[in-house]
Image (tube, rainbow, N blue to C red):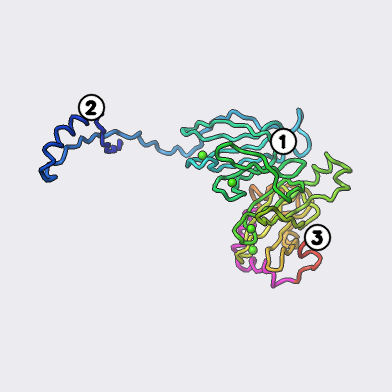
């Protein structure tokens, strides 16, 4: 089937001039009853192609790599990928993190053509695209294997410029952004992967102030951190209103035998709830299931719990007696 689109064909400059020369003298003293004629022309659109019900593979000129020549412990945890419209031109662009070498932006040029731009980020693991400074241009934030996150401000003219996020210095492996205190700006939650820090940094990490799960409140002049947990093996981080009270809560999916963690966002502060995962032992405490927490079983399980009203009451902070030592974490 063909589709036709009417097109008003513009005449050339010479023809338009002649046409006006013929019309204008007679138009001075006459009504507009004699309108100039228009020529309509139809151009067929592309023939509609039925969906084949499958995905078409297209190669990108890029390879995300492990940190060394050989794949080492924890390199297989995966790397970040994010899609958003970075240049506000209406199409989605791609950002890929890389544990070795530069990360990359793939600018969407249309018709499945992507232009590569490299970012000199070191050992980037997760990637978020958010408008950190609320200037209307989406910025890029990477987490790294061993250090704090890096912030790449989107200068719409000069490109992406690496800058510091004042107050954010804790090592982070997973990260997520949301307005947690409903004051209109984006706050940050980070969580570490301590196994890798211990492996690589050894005693310097063991005798440091540690990492763990951090909430960074955006003050407008910088970020003020609050530590919710001293330890984490965070493969995944989810900000989700699990008790449907209008405030986003924090869910951390941990690797190994460390139980997953949940903090409720209450008026009195962050309330740690570890017992829901103890009740779900076998689903969330084994390392393999924890790995699948984000991509397969875990997230769906949490969504089902929140939607099922009898179970949702389990997450009502008024229905439990919290351990005061675990309510707000410790610095
Ligand atoms: Ca774009
Ligand atoms: Ca921005
Ligand atoms: Ca906020
Ligand atoms: Ca909530």
Which residue in the structure is indicated by mark 1? 122
Which residue in the structure is indicated by mark 3? 330
Pointer 3: residues within 10 angstroms few (<14), some, or many (20+)?
A: few
Question: What residue do we see at 61% from left, 38% from top?
Answer: 160
Question: What residue do we see at 59% from left, 41% from top?
Answer: 154
Alpha carbon of mark 1 to alpha carbon of mark 3: how far? 31 Å
Which residue in the structure is indicated by mark 2? 14
User: Is residue 52 rendered to the left or right of residue 255?
Assistant: left
| Res 305 visible | no
Alpha carbon of mark 1 to alpha carbon of mark 2: how far? 60 Å
Q: Label 2 CB, ligand 1: below 8 Å? A: no
Q: Which residues are magenta?
A: 299-320
Pointer 1: residues within 10 angstroms few (<14), some, or many (20+)?
A: many
Q: Earlier in the sequence, mark 1 or mark 2?
A: 2
In magenta segment, residue 303: yes
Q: Secondary structure at mark 3?
A: loop
Q: Earlier in the sequence, mark 1 or mark 3?
A: 1
Q: How far across and down, in percent of the image, does residue 250 sit? A: 68, 57
Q: Earlier in the sequence, mark 2 or mark 3?
A: 2
């Amino acid at each position: 089937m063909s589709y036709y689109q009417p097109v008003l064909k513009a005449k050339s400059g010479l023809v338009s001039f002649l046409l006006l020369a013929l019309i204008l003298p007679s138009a001075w003293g006459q009504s507009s009853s004699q309108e100039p004629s228009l020529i309509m022309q139809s151009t067929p659109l592309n023939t509609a192609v039925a969906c084949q019900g499958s995905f078409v593979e297209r190669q990108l000129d890029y390879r995300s790599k492990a940190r060394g020549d050989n794949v080492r412990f924890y390199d297989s945890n995966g790397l970040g990928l994010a899609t958003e419209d970075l240049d506000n031109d209406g199409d989605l662009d791609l950002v890929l993190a890389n544990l070795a070498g530069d990360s990359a932006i793939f600018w969407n040029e249309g018709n499945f053509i992507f232009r590569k731009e490299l970012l000199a980020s070191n050992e980037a693991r997760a990637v978020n695209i958010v408008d950190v400074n609320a200037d209307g241009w989406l910025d890029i934030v990477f987490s790294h294997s061993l250090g704090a996150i890096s912030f790449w401000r989107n200068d719409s003219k000069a490109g992406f410029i690496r800058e510091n996020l004042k107050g954010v210095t804790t090592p982070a492996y997973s990260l997520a952004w949301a307005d947690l205190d409903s004051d209109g700006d984006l706050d940050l939650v980070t969580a570490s992967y301590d196994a890798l820090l211990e492996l690589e940094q050894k005693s310097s990490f063991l005798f440091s102030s540690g990492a763990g799960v951090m909430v960074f409140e955006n003050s407008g002049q910088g970020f003020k951190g609050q530590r919710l947990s001293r330890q984490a093996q965070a493969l995944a981080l989810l900000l989700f209103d699990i008790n449907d009270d209008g405030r986003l809560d924090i869910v951390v999916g941990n690797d190994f035998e460390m139980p997953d963690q949940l903090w409720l966002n209450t008026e009195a502060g962050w309330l740690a709830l570890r017992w829901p995962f103890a009740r779900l032992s076998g689903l969330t405490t084994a390392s393999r299931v924890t790995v699948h927490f984000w991509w397969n079983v875990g997230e769906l399980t949490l969504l089902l719990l929140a939607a099922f009203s009898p179970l949702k009451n389990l997450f009502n902070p008024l229905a439990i007696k919290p351990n005061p030592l675990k309510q707000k974490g410790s610095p």
